[in-house]
Amino acid sequence: MKNLFVVAIACALVMASCHTAFAGSQPSGGLKAVDLIFVRPVSLAVAIGSTLTLAGISLPVYLVGMGKPAIEIMVKAPWRFTNARPLGAFGHYKDNRPIMEIPDNI
């Protein structure tokens, strides 16, 4: 069962990378299903885990002055990947901004 899950995740990643080459077209139904069944739950778990991790290490992070970059990388980016993109689309978000943005004022 574990091997099947690993193979399914690998197939999802390959399909996602192939899809980015055709970013102008709409995602297929299969790609949307893979995103909904495999990618979104994993990205949700990663987003929750990274948010909880930051909550646990927030005091030392803020004391050394890295609070704002840590929030961008450990909270905003995972939640943005999980929620702010169309179903089956891996190369862009709904607002057409790039996957990862770190503001200049950090």
Image: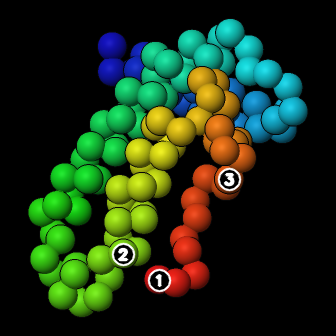
At horizontal 47% and vertical 83% (from top left) the residue drawn is 106
- Secondary structure under tag 1 reads loop
Q: What's the CA distance linking mark 2 and mark 3?
A: 20 Å
Q: Nearer the viewer, residue 14 or 61?
A: 61
Q: Amino acid at mark 3?
A: Arg
Q: Amino acid at mark 2?
A: Lys
**Residue that lies at the very extreme toward the top in this rendered image:** 29
Task: Quadrant for residue 10, please give it.
Answer: top right
Q: Are marks 2 and 1 in contact (CB under 8 Å)?
A: yes
Q: Position of residue 86 (x, y in %)?
A: 62, 29
Q: Position of residue 50 (x, y in %)?
A: 29, 53
Residue 14 in view, yes or no: no
Q: What's the CA distance linking mark 3 and mark 1?
A: 18 Å
Coloring applied to the structure: rainbow
**Residue that lies at the very extreme toward the bottom in this rendered image:** 64
Q: Amino acid at mark 1?
A: Ile
In the picture of the structure, the residue carrying the numbered disc 3 is: 97
Determine whether 69 is above or below 85 in the image.
below
Task: Quadrant for residue 27, please give it.
Answer: top right
With 74 as the anchor, is 63 left or right in this view? left
Determine whether 6 is above or below 90 in the image.
above
Q: Which dot marks residue 9?
A: none
- Secondary structure under tag 3 reads loop
In the picture of the structure, the residue carrying the numbered disc 1 is: 106
- Secondary structure under tag 2 reads helix
Q: Crowding at label 1, few (<14), some or many (≥20) Cα neighbours within 10 Å?
A: few
Q: Nearer the viewer, residue 104 or 73?
A: 104
Q: Position of residue 82 (x, y in %)?
A: 46, 37
In the picture of the structure, the residue carrying the numbered disc 2 is: 68
Determine whether 48 is above or below 102 in the image.
above
At horizontal 59% and vertical 36% (from top left) the residue drawn is 85
